[in-house]
Amino acid sequence: MRQDLVCARTLLVALSLLVVAGVSAQQPPGIPSAPAPALSAPPAAPPGTAPALEPKAIEVLKASSSRLAAARTMSFTAVASYESPSRLGPALVYTTRSLVTLQRPDKLRVIQTGDGPTSEFYYNGKTMVAFMPAEKLAAVADAPPTIDSMLEAAYQSHGTYFPFTDALVADPYGDIAKGLELAFYVGQSRVVGGTTTDIVAYAGDGVFVQMWIGVQDKLPRMARAVFQKDPLQLRHQVEFSSWKLDGAVPAGAFASSRAAAAKRMPFAHPDPGPPMVGTPPPPAAETPKTK
C-alpha cells in the first residue's frame, strides 16, 4: 500500500506537467559570488508614440491562429523548458519533450519524456487517461466532449497543463484577444526553427509572451513567457518542430492497450494548497496561454 501511494503521488505530480526540482547547482569553492547588477525600470514610452495593439502584430497572430484552427488533424513536437530556483538562487532549467497528436474536435494524445518520469495522456471525447508506463498506473476520468472544454476541466480538477495549449484550442487568437492589452511587432529572425520567422510580443492577463512564427507557413516555432506576478520572473519556453497538418492519423492513436491494462486510480490535484511561484496559468478563456 505504501508503495502504491508513493507511485500515485509521482503520477499526480507528473500529470501537472511541472518539472520536479531536486537537483541543486554547486558553485566551485574559492570563487566569489558576483554582485547582483542594479535593476532599473525601462523608461516609459512617450504617450501616443505607438498603438497598444500594433496592426502588424495582430495580423501575424491572426494568420497563425487561422492556420492552426483550419487543421482537422495535426502533430508536432514541443520541447518545453522551465526555470526553477536552485539552492544558491540562480535558476536551473528543466526540460520536457512532448509528441503531440490532435484530431478535432475531440481527440488528443501527448507522449511526454524529459527531466522527470515519462507520461502519456489520451483523450477520445469521452474519457481522459494519464498513464505512467514505469509505474504501470493510469488515472482515468470522464471528460467533456471537446478539446477546449477538456483542457479547462483537466487543469481545474487536477492541475494538468500543457504549455502548448494555444496550438490546440479551436480559436487560438480568440483566446488571446480576450485579455490582450499590448501587442507589437519586433522584426524577423532567420535562426529560430530553421526558417524565416516573424517575431511578435504581446501581453495581457498577467503574462508577457514573445513568439516566433513562420513567415511562409504561419506556424509557431518558439514562444517565451514570463508571468508578471512571479517575483523571480522565471522564464518558460516552448520550441516547436516536426509540424504535420491534415495528415492521416493511425487508427487507435488515442488509446493505449498498456494504459487499459494498468492499475487504475482517480485523478486528483497534486497540490490543493496555494499555487507554486511561476506555475503556468490555467488554459481557461480568461487567461492567456503560451502557444
Image: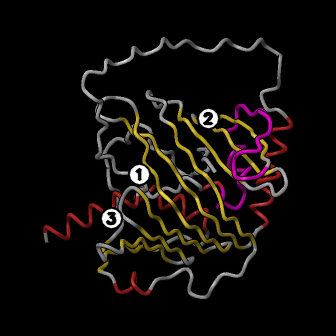
User: Going by the image, does 132 lie left or right of 252?
Assistant: left
Near mark 1 (Cα within 10 A), the count class, few <14, some 14-19 or many ≥20, is many
For image coordinates 61% across by 47% down, the residue present is: 290
Tell me whether circle 3 and circle 2 mark residues in contact (CB < 8 Å): no
Q: Is residue 171 magenta?
A: yes
Q: Position of residue 25 (x, y in %)?
A: 31, 37
* Rendered image quadrant of residue 47: top right
Near mark 2 (Cα within 10 A), the count class, few <14, some 14-19 or many ≥20, is some
User: Going by the image, does 97 lie left or right of 180?
Assistant: left
Q: Amino acid at mark 2?
A: Phe
Q: Determine which of the numbered discs, if any, sits on residue 11 in the image.
A: 3
In whole angstroms, how far apart are the C-alphas of marks 1 and 2?
19 Å
- Kindly state the secondary structure of the residue where label 2 is placed: strand
Q: Which numbered disc, 1 or 2, marks the residue that appears first in the sequence?
A: 1
Q: Determine which of the numbered discs, if any, sits on residue 18 in the image.
A: 1
Specify the segment rendered in magenta.
167-195
For image coordinates 37% across by 41% down, the residue present is: 276
